[in-house]
Image (cartoon, rainbow, N blue to C red):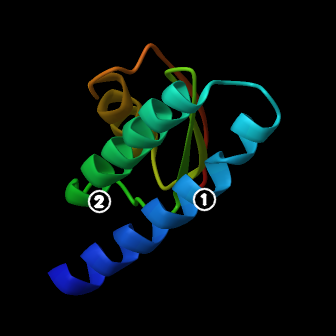
Amino acid sequence: MKYARALAFAALAGATIISAGCSVARDQQTMGSYVDDAGITTAVKAKMAEDKSVSATSISVETLNGTVQLSGFAKSQAEKNQAEAIARNTKNVRDVRNSIVVRP
């Protein structure tokens, strides 16, 4: 079970890093801040994967200039709040925008 979870997280982290490269090409951020943002995104997703009360596969994490955008679906308000708390308590996060929709 741990192996499958780690493999799923690695796939998500890789996809996140690849998709975030578009912001550099569009001159929205520098390469240095892109690397920092990719690290933040990966750290948030890793913490979510470790937390059994949050479904890391149902929540998308994107970071731009230190601001984390959460989207996707949660099964409860508590899960939505926990995802936001995880993001807010991650190193170098400046702000969190929580657009997660609660859908039981």
Alpha carbon distance from label 2 to label 1: 19 Å
Picture quadrant where residue 65 is located: top right
Question: Depth check: 67 or 100 in front?
Answer: 67
Q: Quadrant of the N terminus?
A: bottom left
Q: Disc 2, disc 1: CB below 8 Å?
A: no
Mark 1 crowd level (few <14, some 14–19, many ≥20, 10 Å Cα): few
Question: Depth check: 61 or 72 in front?
Answer: 61
Identify the residue at image location x=62%, y=25%: 30
Which disc is residue 45 wearing?
none
- Amino acid on which disc 1 is placed: Ile
Residue 2: in sight, yes or no?
yes
Q: Position of residue 11 (x, y in %)?
A: 45, 73
Q: In this view, does 19 lie above or below 87?
A: below
> Pointer 1: what residue?
18
Q: In this view, does 20 lie to the left or right of 82?
A: right
Identify the residue at image location x=33%, y=37%: 82
- As helix, strand or loop, the secondary structure at mark 2 comes to helix
Residue 57: in sight, yes or no?
no
Q: Is residue 39 above or below residue 46?
A: above
Which disc is residue 49 wearing?
2
Mark 2 crowd level (few <14, some 14–19, many ≥20, 10 Å Cα): some
- Amino acid on which disc 2 is placed: Ala
Going from N to C along the chain, the mark reached first, 2 or 1, is 1
| Residue projecting furthest to the front | 31
